[in-house]
Amino acid sequence: MKTVIDYINDLKEKTGSDYKTAKLLKIDKASLSVIRSKGRMADETAIKVAEALGVDETEVLIAAAVARSDGKVLSAWLKISKAVGAAASFLLAIQILSPIATYTKCILC
């Protein structure tokens, strides 16, 4: 599972600098530094990061929630993360196999 900092680094790679990343997220550079140092971000920022990267908001929101959690809450978020990951993998497999299924006849047909 990717961390908040991983997503920020991905966004920095895309924008070219922390300054441009902060500007894109509509936060100041000091706030971006706090995100990097603490490894935590607000849900609103997580959504902006997901949109900027073109990734599912759910995965960035879960990373943000995991970073803010501990104990039983952390365990619950990690379970959710695994479940979402498994569901996403299943849906991806269906999308990949759909064209194959279109050209294949069922043995009962």
Image: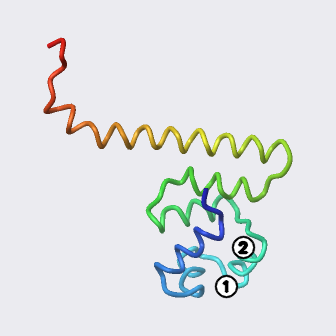
Q: Nearer the viewer, residue 85 or 36?
A: 85
Would you call the spot at circle 1 few (<14 residues within 10 Å), some (14-19), or many (20 or more)? some
Q: Amino acid at mark 1?
A: Lys
Determine the residue positioned at 56% across, 50% down: 58
Q: Residue furthest right?
A: 71
Closer to the eye: label 1 or 2: 2
Q: Which residue, given by chain and number where applicable, does mark 1 sit on?
A: 29
Q: Locate residue 38 relative to residue 98 in the image: left or right.
A: right
Q: Locate residue 74 relative to residue 46 in the image: left or right.
A: right
Dividing the picture into quadrants, the one containing residue 63 is: bottom right
Is 7 drawn above or below residue 71 in the view shown?
Answer: below
Q: Amino acid at mark 2?
A: Ile
User: For residue 35, which numbered disc appears in the image?
Assistant: 2
Determine the residue positioned at 49% across, 53% down: 56
Is 33 drawn above or below residue 83 in the view shown?
Answer: below
**Secondary element at tag 1:** helix
**Secondary element at tag 2:** helix
Is 101 drawn above or below residue 23 in the view shown?
Answer: above
Would you call the spot at circle 2 few (<14 residues within 10 Å), some (14-19), or many (20 or more)? some
Residue 20: x and y in percent read 54, 85
Inter-mark Cα distance, 1 to 2: 10 Å
Residue 94: x and y in percent read 34, 37
